[in-house]
Amino acid sequence: MFSLGIDGEINIDDPGLQNLNVDLQADLTRDRLDFLPPQLQLILKRTHAKGKLSVKAGASVAMSDLARGKADLNLDVRNIQLSAGDIQIPVDDLAVSAQLRDGKVQQSVKIAALNNVFDLSGWVALNNRLDTDTTLTMKDVQIEPLIAALRPGEPAPTTSTKLSAAIEIQSPVMVAFGAVPRAENEPVAAVNVRNLRLTTDDPITPGTPLDFVACDRFGVVLMSLPAPGKPIAVDQVVVEHPAIRAVATGPGSKRFAGFLSLQNLAGNSAAPATNPAASVASTMPAMSLPRLSDIFRLGSLSVTDASLYYDPRIDETTPFSLKGVTTKVTMDSLAGDAYQFDVLIPSKPDLNIELAGRVNVDSFIVDPLKLDFSAHISGETRKSFPPEVQKLMLPYEPVGKIAVKVEGNVPLRNPMASNLEADVLVDDFAATTGDYRIPIDHLRLPIRLRDDEVEFLDADKLGGPMLEALSGRADLTGKVKLNDRLDSTLSLIVDGMLLQDLMADKISDPKKQLIGAIHADVELVNAPVLVVAAKAMPQSDGSGGHLSQLASENLPVVWGSASIELTQARLIGFELVQGMGNIAKSVFTDLFHREDKDKPEVVVPKETAKIECTFNRSKIWISTLHYEGEDLGADGKGWVGLNQQVNLNLTGGPISKLAGMGTVGNWIKNASDSLLYYHVSGTFSDLKIETKRGDGQPIVEGAKNITEKGVKAVGTGLDKAGSFIHGLFNHNKDQNQN
């Protein structure tokens, strides 16, 4: 049950001990400790020790020079419990060994608990500084049993996560506590975590370990120990080759292997307080938070060769990876409140990001901020982006070069109050939208964000125009307020974009034979864009969202205008004009008995079309609607509502082209105008045409037949035009329904 043996020699001439040996063996399983010293009894009772206790010690030491003595200590105790409140951790074995040689104590502590082994080893120099070097080594320590021990009475986690690391601490202890002066620039402590690994089972290949968090070295250098009323001063933080591998536990899952265990552990540490005083305190007035620089100061931070592997397991995508990421942070003020930073992500030749600037950690203002982003997007390089972005890109199949440069300042507490200038440059770009593959030869878009407002600047500073595409150009300038309505004052000028280029980029049949150059001048003046969009979009789902609420708001009396002209055109691919053109050929043949009406014709692009309109409240008022072709002429006016309602009056038609053909032609044209015009109403998807007649009589016998043909042609053409316009506005919607 208990044995104690002591032997050795005592030197009286030179006071000291020679070859002193102590051997203590005790059986603690019988609930009797009265044979042990009271101090040891107290320790064993508090740890609920129920195993075997073994203590062996030896020493040879002169009292006049203790540091030069020799000593050994070996202690082993089994089956004890470490308790803290309701938490109890069973320890299978606690083994301690120490050796004193040449003024240095070497020690080793091994703890076996919860099927894990913790190894603490190191040395202490017995000098006036007490230089210390200690390392805690953990190898495949299972986290889940620790969580279960910290949460008694709750179901144990079903995951399996292991921790491996070596934590090193070096410190001149007496220097750290101020008892001994330190050398110049000497740190009081250095902490290094080496070979950190958090490992779990790979959900893609079960049975294979996955290091979801890893780091070769995480080092911290302290210039002083924390003291009341003073900030924690960290001179240096060095992070070498940190790596994160986030792999979803299942296809499309929002949970990632290994991180769930960390969330459970964090949830335990953040459990809500049950102390009634806590709820009382929560009702007290909020106190102002201390400045971050008064709590913590960092001399420098260096991160080298960081990497990220991200796989949410989304179908038809490739996992996202970054490599070679570097970060540098250095203090940039005597007050310790400002830091320079530089983050470089040169992970791939087709994707590069650099972020740099200066941040004040008290005011949380980044000034200046610089961002350089460049990407070369193609079929393979789209895999360089996160899978969610790849999925978004998939239907558009974008290719091209994109570069973005941003400079300015950002108040992190209110990013919308940022003052930034951005230059967006796009070259040789193409993307698919609907039935078209749209090319962009050149985009130069300078933007300024200031005072909750986005301003589109003149593109000349970037070697404009803003846009070159479809053999033409476009320029956009103006401002958009970042409020809940997006009030906008914008100017868009389009010059010479060719319809035939757009038609050539159509990727599905039938391809429309449209030719012409588009010229447009569109102005918005304090236009609430989101209100316009809300009124133009169907709100039948009853969702009651933000757009639904905006749909009930009133629009300004006048919020813009547009002038759009099509020149050097051939519009036979557009259903309305095609129908009218066909009837025009029939009209001329009937009137003049042309015998060659069925002969092949060579179509020369001589058509023009023009629309001038203003945006008034919820309607687009068309003051000028003019079309003129070789066989057809028409004018009109009226309005089109944002709700796709149409109210137009069209005059002219195939007979109007007879004007200028002499007395007979003018006579027929004038008589026709008095006989007939068309009133178009309904919606884009359901157009209705009414024929309005005057009191005049037909000029020739066939005029009535001609008029009836005109009505039929207009009706057919407008129905097709309505379907065409409806398809433009609802292509994606119809595709989804199909």
Image (cartoon, helix red, strand yellow):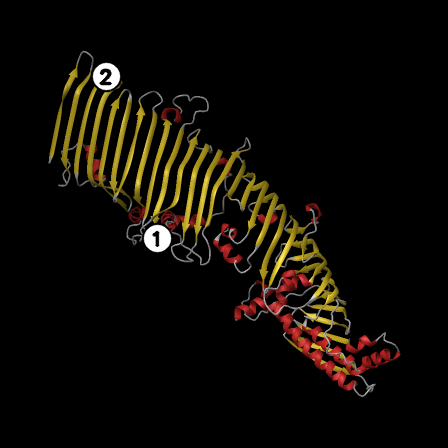
On screen, residue 176 versus residue 26, left or right, reads: right
Identify residue type, mark 1: Thr
Q: Position of residue 503 (x, y in %)?
A: 65, 64
- Quadrant in the picture for residue 476: bottom right
Residue 226 in view here? no
Precedes in sequence: disc 1 or disc 2: 2
Q: Tag 2's secondary structure? A: loop
On screen, residue 139 versus residue 306, left or right, reads: left
Q: Residue at x 41, y 27 (%)?
A: 188
Numbered badge on residue 205: 1
Is 666 placed above or below 295 here? Answer: below
Observer-nearest of 468 and 108? 468
Most distant residue in the bottom direction: 701
Observer-nearest of 297 and 144? 144
Crowding at mark 1 (Cα within 10 Å: few <14, some 14-19, many 20+): few
Is 248 placed above or below 172 here? Answer: below
Q: Residue at x 31, y 22 (%)?
A: 126
Identify residue type, mark 2: Met
Crowding at mark 2 (Cα within 10 Å: few <14, some 14-19, many 20+): some
Q: Position of residue 669 (x, y in %)?
A: 83, 79
Q: CA distance from mark 1 to mark 2?
A: 64 Å
Numbered badge on residue 63: 2
Q: Position of residue 680 (x, y in %)?
A: 71, 77
Judge depth for marks 1 and 2 and give the one in front. Answer: 1
On screen, residue 649 versus residue 727, left or right, reads: right
Residue 659 in view here? yes
